[in-house]
Amino acid sequence: MSSIECVIIILKLKLSSRDKNLSYYVRLAHKEDIAQVTEIDREAFPTLWPPVDYEHELQSWLAHYIVAYDDSEMGEEAEVTVAPEKSLSRLTSRVRQLFNDEHFFSSELPPPGRQYIIGFAGFWIMADEAHITNIAVRKIHRRRGIGELLLISIIDLATELNARNLTLEVRASNTAAQSLYYKYGFSQVGLRRGYYTDNKEDAVLMSAENITSASFQSRLNQLKKAHSQKWGIALYQVVR
Ligand SMILES: CC(C)(COP(=O)(O)OP(=O)(O)OC[C@H]1O[C@@H](n2cnc3c(N)ncnc32)[C@H](O)[C@@H]1OP(=O)(O)O)[C@@H](O)C(=O)NCCC(=O)NCCS
């Protein structure tokens, strides 16, 4: 298997906008993504100190990170992402289980070359709880459904990993993110006063419980359908 061939088992989602045909992909993060993920983190959370050490995060077996990238733009400094062969079967099986539908799988080759990452998200899994540590989209790509796409992917991945509850903290002033979480069934369950060290801002604690329940999954499916209609998702596909 060549290095290009072993890149690539990814979840591919095609979205179109009025002015441009876009193809967005979501896959598990690799260590080769750390530079761009860190760049997005710094843009989204410039005042958080110390910055998150994503190299350390990716090494933790509790942590699960995904990235979204747009194949129409190639990062200058981004390296081709090559997954180690041993990760291949794990990734294949995860993504297959994630969507659990052979219809969406094909042997189409993904575009070779550099990958421009537009957003990422991660969570830690502890017993039956998935704690969302981060979700961020590059500023110029916001309000195009990518944050929602990442959250959907996280919920599906956490469900597949047997999580029953999702938790997170969000700044009290971050109404954009809170609105995304409320949309997906999270509710406020607490407040941590002065939690953020940079400006002593309060953290709103949010959770979504019983994510495997029929009612949660049914609402999730409705939201996915609405998202796919709004953004013109053509297909979900794993390519290699
Ligand atoms: C929060 C964030 C990830 C949303 O990403 P995005 O790609 O712009 O979001 P989407 O386009 O998928 O929007 C999905 C939903 O999020 C909410 N939302 C996103 N941006 C919003 C805004 N500026 N104002 C209000 N609601 C907003 C809405 O509920 C929206 O649903 P709608 O389109 O039906 O209104 C993005 O704003 C971001 O990266 N922010 C900086 C990092 C951050 O704060 N992360 C959260 C840490 S807890």
Image (cartoon, helix red, strand yellow):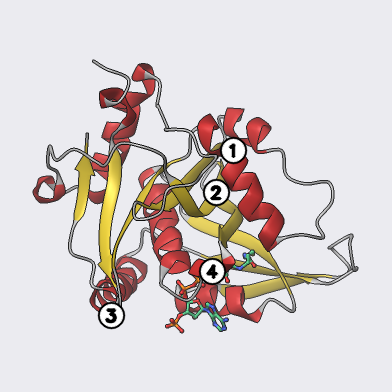
Residue under circle 1?
34
Which mark is nearer the camera, 1 or 3?
A: 3
Which mark is nearer the camera, 3 or 2?
A: 3
Residue under circle 4?
140
Q: Amino acid at mark 2?
A: Gly
Residues under numbered marks 1 and 3 in contact, where contact means CB atoms less than 8 Å apart: no
Residue 194: x and y, percent? 89, 68
Residues under numbered marks 2 and 4 in contact, where contact means CB atoms less than 8 Å apart: no
**Quadrant that contains the C terminus:** top left
Residue under circle 3?
18
- Give whichever of discs 3 and 2 has the lower sequence position: 3
- How far, Cα to Cα, is label 1 from label 4? 20 Å
Viewer-proximal residue among 232 and 206: 232
* Residue at 55% across, 41% down: 127
- How far, Cα to Cα, is label 1 from label 3? 32 Å
- Give whichever of discs 2 and 1 has the lower sequence position: 1
Q: Of the numbered discs in the image, which one, if any, rests on residue 122?
A: 2
Q: Amino acid at mark 4?
A: Ile
Judge: label 3 CB < 8 Å from ligand 1.
Answer: no
- Numbered disc 2: secondary structure: strand
- Numbered disc 3: secondary structure: loop
* Residue at 34% across, 51% down: 71
Residue 46 in which image quadrant:
bottom right
- Give whichever of discs 2 and 4 has the lower sequence position: 2
Residue 55 vs residue 74: left or right?
Answer: right
- How far, Cα to Cα, is label 2 from label 1? 13 Å
